[in-house]
């Protein structure tokens, strides 16, 4: 037996390991096949996607499929069934319209606006958590070929040998199974934990497995704030960057640190806290309450967009004050905070409420800010540390200074996130 779908996926991945390094895309069948496919994609370092199919059932015998549909208008028909059942065009159109609507609903729920991965000329590995008759997998193979896959391989933890033979003959170039029991009355009997998988969990695994790098817009009250979201494949944590006065999401120092975190497998969100019109009023740049409010709204946006991730804050200069202010909000749920050359004194009244482990990084030559950070550290009640980078000034422009900041932040976030 398999403990759960994750363990089944890891055992299946061992069988598929010879494909590592080839141009493959792993396609999970929603919903139960996606946790299995996630482990396969992770082991093969391959992109993960879902393959959304709906069987088209004969109206008077819905279990008998006369075809299947997929995304982008893909439609495959079994002309023998169509002729044998004497199906009329209007009957088939009615079934397809109903199934197309359900397919579209599932696509919107699962993909959350992310495009599907192009299969043209690639090897598609179609994965399900178990196969009994193979009807759905057969339809998925047909859709994968219609979408341009050059080769289609079926992977599953458990499948009867006769079904595997039929799939090789009729649909797939190969079928890879972990277990091939002669009798398969129910797929769930081969799992200790066969809990139903929700569409929300499928969406989480998909976003986590494919990775993201995209421009985003964050609604904060009446303002629309531009940002850049990068989530490496498999990342379970995102660090939100909060820039200081006179800076923006384009800050080269913050982007340098963000790249280091991405290489360590952490996601990052860099966004502008103010609109261009708001930045003209210098009072807004130092309005820590306003900036912290924008940060909290961006955090809520991120939680809705990627509900599976844990979140940390990286603040610089006045942005560090906003990060600490927002982290101190009850039920903020922030897991770690890092301040670079920060002004935590500007959030002094909120410091005792910060629960997230906090790292304060200050340049050794930035004497005034160093004293402010020492005073702030005494007010923190959470796990905390003050790290001084020798010879560095406020902007960490000295040779090796920013590398030291990146290393400190990476270690803190990877340990706590």
Image (tube, grey):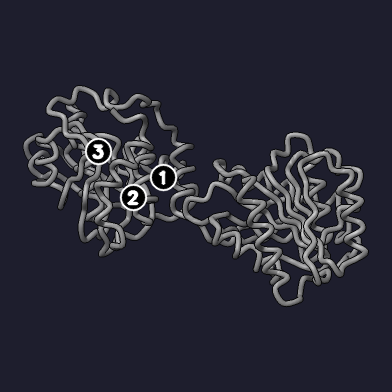
**Numbered badge on residue 55:** 3
Query: In the image, is 333 to the left or to the right of 363?
Result: left
Residue at x 76% of width, y 75% of height: 397
Q: Position of residue 354 (x, y in %)?
A: 80, 41
Q: Which of 1 and 35 is in front in this view?
A: 1
Report whether residue 90 is seen.
no
**Numbered badge on residue 71:** 2
Q: Nearer the viewer, residue 77 or 23?
A: 23
Q: Is mark 2 on a helix, strand or loop?
A: loop
- Which residue, given by chain and number where applicable, does mark 1 sit on? 107
Q: Which comes sooner in the sequence, label 1 or label 3?
A: 3
Q: Nearer the viewer, residue 298 or 97?
A: 298
Q: What element carries label 3?
A: strand
Q: Which of 92 and 189 is in front in this view?
A: 189
Residue at x 83% of width, y 71% of height: 393
Q: Where is residue 347 in the image (x, y as percent from the top left)?
A: 88, 49
Other residues around mark 2 within 10 Å, as few (<14) / some (14–19) / many (≥20): some
Query: In the image, is 255 to the left or to the right of 262?
Result: right
Q: Position of residue 26 (x, y in %)?
A: 32, 51
Q: In which quarter of the image is the N terminus?
A: top left
């Amino acid at each position: 037996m398999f403990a759960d779908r994750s363990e089944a996926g890891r055992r299946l991945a061992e069988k598929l390991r010879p494909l590592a390094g080839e141009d493959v895309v792993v396609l999970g069948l929603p919903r139960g096949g996606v946790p299995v496919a996630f482990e396969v994609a992770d082991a093969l370092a391959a992109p993960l996607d879902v393959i959304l199919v709906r069987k088209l059932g004969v109206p008077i015998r819905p279990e008998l499929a006369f075809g299947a549909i997929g995304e982008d208008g893909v439609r495959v028909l079994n002309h023998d069934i169509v002729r044998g059942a004497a199906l009329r065009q209007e009957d088939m159109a009615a079934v397809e319209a109903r199934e197309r609507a359900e397919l579209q609903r599932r696509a919107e729920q699962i993909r959350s606006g992310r495009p599907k991965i192009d299969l043209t000329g690639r090897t598609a590995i179609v994965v399900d958590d178990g196969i009994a008759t193979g009807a759905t997998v057969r339809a998925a193979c047909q859709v994968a070929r219609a979408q341009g896959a050059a080769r289609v391989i079926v992977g599953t933890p458990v499948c009867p040998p006769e079904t595997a033979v039929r799939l090789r003959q009729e649909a797939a170039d190969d079928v890879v199974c972990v277990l091939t029991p002669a009798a398969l009355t129910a797929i769930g009997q081969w799992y200790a934990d066969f809990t139903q998988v929700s569409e929300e969990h499928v969406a989480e695994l998909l976003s986590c497995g494919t990775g993201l790098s995209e421009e985003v817009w964050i609604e904060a009250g009446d303002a629309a704030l531009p940002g850049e979201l990068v989530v490496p494949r498999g990342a379970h944590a995102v660090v939100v960057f909060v820039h200081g006065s006179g800076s923006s999401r384009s800050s080269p120092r913050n982007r340098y640190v963000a790249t280091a975190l991405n290489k360590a497998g952490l996601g990052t969100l860099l966004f502008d806290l103010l609109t261009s019109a708001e930045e003209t009023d210098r009072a807004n740049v130092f309005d820590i309450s306003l900036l912290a409010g924008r940060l909290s709204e961006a955090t809520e946006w991120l939680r809705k967009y990627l509900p599976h991730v844990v979140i940390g804050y990286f603040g610089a200069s006045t942005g560090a004050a906003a990060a600490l202010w927002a982290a101190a909000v009850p039920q903020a749920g922030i897991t770690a905070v890092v301040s670079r050359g920060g002004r935590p004194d500007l959030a002094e009244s909120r410091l005792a409420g910060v629960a997230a482990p906090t790292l304060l990084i200050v340049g050794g030559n930035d004497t005034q800010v160093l004293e402010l950070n020492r005073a702030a550290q005494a007010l923190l009640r959470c796990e905390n540390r003050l790290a001084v980078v020798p010879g560095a000034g406020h902007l960490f422009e000295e040779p090796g200074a920013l590398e030291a900041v990146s290393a400190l932040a990476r270690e803190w976030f990877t340990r706590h996130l």
